Image (cartoon, rainbow, N blue to C red):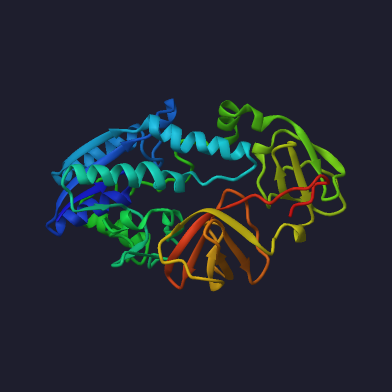
Amino acid sequence: MRILVAMSGGVDSSVVAALLVEQGHQVVGATLQLYDHGAAVQKKGACCAGQDIRDARDVAGRLGIAHYVLDREARFRAAVIEDFADSYARGETPIPCIRCNQTVKFQDLSLLAEDLGCDMLATGHYARRLDGPELHRAADPVRDQSYFLAHTTRAQLARVLFPLGGMASKAEVRAHALRLGVPVAEKPDSQDICFVPEGRYDSLVAKLRPEAMEPGEIVDAEGRVLGRHAGIGRYTVGQGRGLGIAAPERLFVTALDAGRRRVVVGPRAAVPVETITAREVNWLAEPPAGPFRCQAKLRGREQPQPVSAEWDGAALRITPDAPAVAAPGQAAVLYEGERVLGAGFIAARRVDEAGAAA
């Protein structure tokens, strides 16, 4: 087949390209230039900026394949960075990797693959795609990225390959890199949000949405003022550090009231919720009629937990078997065993005049 490989300059996508060349496919490499933040372009282990583009070009040269660099900085800023800042201003905790996969990566690269006459698009994500098309968890549960891919569409999945999804570990991937002579075999994995390489997301939010960093009150569920904060953009539901409140028991963020610039806090037991509403739902299977049982992940690093769910055509309502922490803006991904059924974004709970979330 003729296959377009999304090459970030890291070991995963480089191994994908090398394996497909070894298998005899006609491979074309493509790298998205998404941002350029001065010193960030020299940082190894990020993605989609200066050094990483050079690494991707070097790998393509070693493999003897064509390589394209696509400037998508303006689109990435509008679809991902601006959305990231907007989410914090609304009192949410965004997941920019999902937005990036939703928009720039899979939309733009799928169109490029079509323009170049490619049969498939391949990426270095850890997930498995079965015919149907179905999205399944990766063989390695530690590396599984199905949570971050659950907002891709069925049409996109029909033309995507995830060659690393069946590998047992990252060590196996690096072993292939060494065997195939991939020059980035020892390159470290990315750790930070790519466009916030120093991890100071609050500085970026303050620059783009200064209203998210305006001071306000910290209140309890009854509306009693317990202290002051330096901007709701610095907080997330479930957070228990950095509140600066002296109290008989440790307090945690239970809700964010962006309209009144309030951070609502309470004891640890007040953080988990019994019901969750998710919107912007993307189905990768036919949505069941009426209530149904499945598993759900509400954060990227947790394991799927048993829930009951119901879809009314506009919103997805999830009832975990045990109350769960659900931060607005995060994804709620539904699973049936290893298969991804669908996903939505967790909606904020309404906060009443006193400060109680419902």
- Can residue 280 be seen? yes
The residue that appears at 74% across and 55% down in the rendered structure is 358
Viewer-proximal residue, 285 or 271?
285
What quarter of the picture does the N terminus occupy?
bottom left
Q: State whether residue 38 is above or below residue 304.
A: above
Quadrant of residue 230 within the rendered picture: top right
- Can residue 200 be seen? no
Q: Position of residue 167 (x, y in %)?
A: 32, 65
Q: Position of residue 150 (x, y in %)?
A: 43, 57
- On the rendered structure, is 75 left or right of 204? left
Viewer-proximal residue, 153 or 269?
153
Viewer-proximal residue, 186 or 72?
72
The residue that appears at 45% across and 33% down in the rendered structure is 78
Quadrant of residue 73 within the rendered picture: top left
The residue that appears at 59% across and 45% down in the rendered structure is 93
The residue that appears at 37% across and 61% down in the rendered structure is 127
- On the rendered structure, is 346 left or right of 343? right
Q: Position of residue 330 (x, y in %)?
A: 56, 51
- On the rendered structure, is 177 left or right of 285? left
Count of picture labels? 0
Q: Position of residue 63 (x, y in %)?
A: 16, 46
